[in-house]
Image: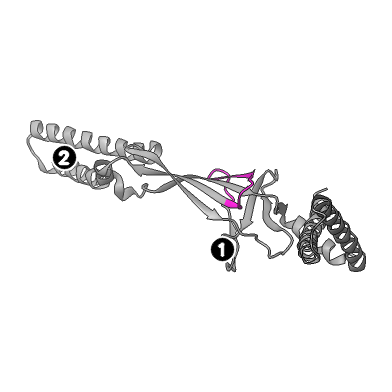
Amino acid sequence: MIIFSLIICAILLFISMISINKNSIRTVLSIIFAVGLIVSMIFMIENDKRHLGMHKVESSKTSKLVSAVSSNQVNLLLYQTVGTSGKEKVYIYKTKSNQKKEITTNPDPSKTENKIKNTNESAKLVTRTVRWEYKNNFYKFWFGISGNGHKLVRHYNTFFVNNDWAVLSTQQAKELQKIAKNENQSEVKEEAKEYVETEVKGKLTKALTKDPSMSAKEQQILTAKASLQAQKDFKKMMMQKLINEVKK
């Protein structure tokens, strides 16, 4: 509405100056419409530059965090450095398991702030969004046409990752894939076999020491359970070893 007010005051000022013959009336009306024109311009500029009639409104959204790359050993939160300093990062991730295309954070550091935090819970992304909104319908009536409503101030992304996750650059992820592919599989299998046997033997010995009366069936169940857990632990340990290598 403020734009219409400005236009109307400008038109009335023009009409009053060329159509009214009586000096006193022309002068008074010209001053009134000129003041209206100037005030409308000031208010419009204040709304555009200093957000007159507006206030910041904050909203928060929590999303499940899904690895950007499919892997049975580790979940990856990837990032790509932007700019010449390399300090700013664009993070690459998914929020659904069946999601085909990755999501990237806004590369503009003036609009988005990203943080990584460790958690013992499931991985998640908490996005806090701050926008400019009109204080009430009065200000919305006057300035709503300018389109400043819902204007983004800043996104604050906090990635909560647990021990099953690794944060790597896209280059490091490619290097990780390359190293894993070139590993001597026979050596890895031999290491895995030794690790699993040692872990199973240790847990079985501990269990028998605690309860010497364990039946053969109970020992068999414990052995199978310990073997499965040891295999998972070994894969995780080896993957962490490779991750540490690419991070050097």
The residue singled out by tag 2 in the image is 17
Q: Position of residue 118 (x, y in %)?
A: 65, 44
**Is residue 121 located in the magenta-colored stretch of the structure?**
yes
Task: Quickly name the residue at label 1.
Answer: 96
Is there CB contact under 8 Å for labels 1 and 2? Answer: no
In the rendered structure, which amino acid carries the disc numbered 1? Lys
Q: CA gap, disc 1 to disc 2?
A: 66 Å
Magenta segment boundaries in residue numbering: 107-124
Which residue reaches farthest front? 213
Residue 135 on image: x %, y %: 31, 40
Q: Is residue 144 left or right of residue 160?
A: left
Closest to the observer: 218 or 238? 218
Q: Is residue 20 left or right of residue 186?
A: left
**22 left or right of 130?**
left
- Work out whether residue 8 or residue 84 is closer to the camera in this orientation and state it: 84
Q: Which mark is residue 236?
A: none
